[in-house]
Amino acid sequence: MAQQATVEWYSRIFGFKLLGNISHIKRSATPNAAIFGIYPANLNEVKLAYMATGNGVGFEIFEFVDPKPQQGDFFDYGRKGFFHICVTDPNPDVLADKVEAAGGKRIGKTVDPSGNGDIKCLYLSDPWGNVVEVLSVSFEWLGCRTAY
């Protein structure tokens, strides 16, 4: 993953804003940096980009430089942990076309999770394989519509 390219992609496609600069942190230069108190002792170098979404939610992009992470299978939904993010866009199919034109992929087809024909939902991946769900309504509205 090229940190700058990832930041630019999320800015261009989803409108996320970079907050400040991308941080490049090396244990050899700043051994007491907070990140090294969170991650194991074998983490020696990382790049961090802090971004904000349109509604103020934080979105962080980490690039682990040393050691580099292992590449997993694409769309490995059976793995443990965090799986995807969800964004709201009034026209998910138009956004999906934009994602595909910018190197991402559609995953599956557009569906209506409410069963009423008035909500669109689809899954995409960015060029690096991260999964993004797109809903045509807010998550709160979806929860309200599907709760009954």
Image: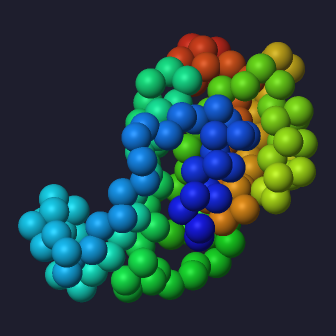
In depth, the one of 37 and 105 nearer the eye is 37
Extreme residue toward the left, this view:
32
Name which residue lies at 73% across and 47% down.
123
Name the quadrant of the N terminus: bottom right
Please provide percent x and percent y for residue 141: 60, 15
Please provide percent x and percent y for residue 61: 47, 55
Relative height, residue 38 to residue 41 (above, below): above
Quarter of the rendering containing residue 20: top left
Please provide percent x and percent y for residue 99: 81, 47
Please provide percent x and percent y for residue 47: 40, 64
Q: Is residue 135 shown left or right of residue 97? A: left
Name which residue lies at 77% across and 20% down.
90
* Count of marks overlaid on the render: 0
Residue 99 shows in the view: yes
Q: Is residue 119 shown left or right of residue 84? A: right
Q: Is residue 75 shown left or right of residue 112? A: left
Name which residue lies at 58% across and 79% down.
72
Q: How is the image coloured?
A: rainbow
Residue 143 shows in the view: no
In depth, the one of 56 and 116 nearer the eye is 56
In depth, the one of 88 and 14 nearer the eye is 14
Name the quadrant of the C terminus: top right
Name which residue lies at 68% across and 49% down.
9
